[in-house]
């Protein structure tokens, strides 16, 4: 009898231990009930404020803070002020996951804005889902970020920007229709799923000739060898999926070597540090996809003026997307009691007028909206063209 009792106790202890280990720390207390909207609407920022892509996170923090200030000045949401809780994920995917759990279970936020990058968002999303707290990534673009493993929409993951495959479509259309490029070089970051996804899609949909392909790695600083090989080719444009850290330097070295062909990139170009790295005099005939143009609408103009007044610099696409993300969250929070209600309203968001365009959330939790392609001349935006791939 004693042996049987001891065995039963061990089985019970083992079962409790396994259940405890199977859930994210702290997530069990939230379950599917989510977090309650109380005296304030709690909004958590999970952003890359330090580390390798801090330029994105810092810009998004500024945009988000401006939106919160504006909303609170006009009475908040249902008379409740937005309470902002900001945490730095240090441009580290594991840290982004930990921050999400902390925001949801310790700070008990009702919605999370961020992370900025796709990898960090992918790491953070499961923890947000387990806590039943909606997460809006302003700028994460990997196609399947908002989906579960079976291809269905994750009830708690949303984005304010377009997906990578759509960027590949836009790059192909812009190269063909606007630059009249019949021959291109494809030069992309082979260490980034973001860049590889865009490059893969471009190769699939571009109807003319890719005369050469070359790759680089995140952290590379010397591109002379690859550029020397490309210089001798006959082409009309260089398509360059990648982030500003490397592409800014590539632009500088390419122009200094006498490569004058148009250089076309994705939204990873969309930061002022691209021009800093390239040098303003080298940033000519440079084109990139942007989810924001300061001249695209009256709403965009007003936002740009307010941002410039507050921070002393013009807003980047990342600042604008975070600004819209906060307003999306506030709109979805109207009349709600829990974070679960907010997630349901985000899934039904329709004809939402943001500074990055009017958007409707589709069945995969992606926004349907047009895209701007910005042209740089001497490092300044000299033109903006609205492009749709359909």
Image: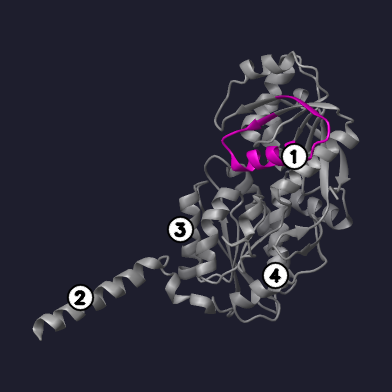
Q: Secondary structure at mark 2?
A: helix
Residue 177 visible in rendering: yes
The residue tagged 1 is 204
Whether residues under marks 1 and 3 lie with C-beta atoms below 8 angstroms apart, the answer is no
Q: Secondary structure at mark 1?
A: helix
| Residue at which label 2 appears | 10
* Among numbered discs 3 and 4, the one appearing first in the sequence: 3
Which span of residues is magenta-colored?
Answer: 187-212
Count residues near mark 4 (Cα–Cα under 10 Å), then give few for <14, some for 14-19, many for 20+: many
Q: Callout 3: helix, strand or loop?
A: helix
Upstream in sequence: badge 1 or badge 3: 3
Of label 2 and label 4, which has the lower sequence position? 2
Distance between the Cα atoms at labels 2 and 3?
31 Å
Query: Where is residue 337 drawn, in percent x and y?
Result: 62, 82
Magenta stretch encompasses residue 188: yes
Please give the name of the residue rendered at 75% of the width and 44% of the height, measured from the top-left corner. 167
Q: Position of residue 123 (x, y in %)?
A: 52, 54
């Amino acid at each position: 009898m004693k042996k049987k009792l001891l065995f039963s106790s061990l089985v019970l202890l083992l079962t409790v231990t396994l259940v405890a280990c199977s859930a994210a720390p702290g997530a069990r207390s939230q379950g599917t009930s989510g977090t309650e909207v109380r005296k304030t609407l709690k909004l958590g920022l999970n952003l890359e404020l330090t580390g390798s892509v801090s330029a994105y996170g810092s810009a998004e923090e500024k945009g988000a803070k401006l939106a919160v200030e504006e909303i609170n000045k006009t009475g908040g949401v249902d008379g409740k002020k937005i309470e902002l809780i900001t945490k730095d994920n240090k441009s580290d995917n594991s840290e982004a996951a930990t921050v999400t759990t902390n925001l949801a279970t310790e700070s008990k936020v009702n919605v999370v804005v961020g992370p900025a990058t796709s990898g960090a968002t992918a790491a953070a999303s499961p923890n947000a889902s387990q806590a039943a707290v909606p997460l809006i990534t302003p700028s994460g673009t990997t196609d399947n970020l908002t989906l579960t493993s079976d291809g269905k929409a994750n009830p708690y993951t949303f984005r304010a920007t377009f997906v990578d495959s759509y960027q590949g479509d836009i790059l192909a259309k812009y190269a063909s229709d606007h630059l009249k490029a019949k021959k291109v070089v494809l030069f992309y970051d082979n260490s980034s799923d973001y860049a590889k996804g865009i490059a893969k899609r471009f190769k699939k949909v571009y109807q003319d000739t890719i005369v050469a392909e070359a790759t680089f790695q995140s952290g590379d600083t010397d591109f002379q060898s690859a550029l020397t090989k490309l210089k001798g080719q006959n082409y009309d444009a260089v398509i360059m999926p990648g982030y500003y850290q490397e592409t800014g330097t590539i632009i500088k070295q390419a122009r200094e070597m006498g490569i004058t062909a148009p250089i076309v990139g994705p939204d990873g170009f969309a930061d002022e540090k691209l021009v800093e790295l390239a040098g303003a005099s080298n940033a000519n005939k440079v084109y990139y996809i942007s989810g924001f143009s300061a001249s695209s609408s009256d709403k965009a103009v007003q936002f740009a003026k307010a941002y410039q007044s507050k921070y002393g610099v013009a807003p980047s696409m990342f600042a604008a997307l975070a600004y819209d993300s906060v307003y999306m969250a506030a709109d979805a929070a109207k009349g709600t009691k829990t974070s679960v209600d907010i997630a349901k309203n985000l899934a039904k968001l329709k004809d939402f007028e943001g500074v990055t365009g009017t958007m409707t959330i589709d069945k995969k939790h992606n926004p349907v909206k047009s895209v701007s392609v910005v042209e740089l001349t001497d490092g300044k935006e000299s033109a903006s063209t609205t492009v749709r791939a359909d």
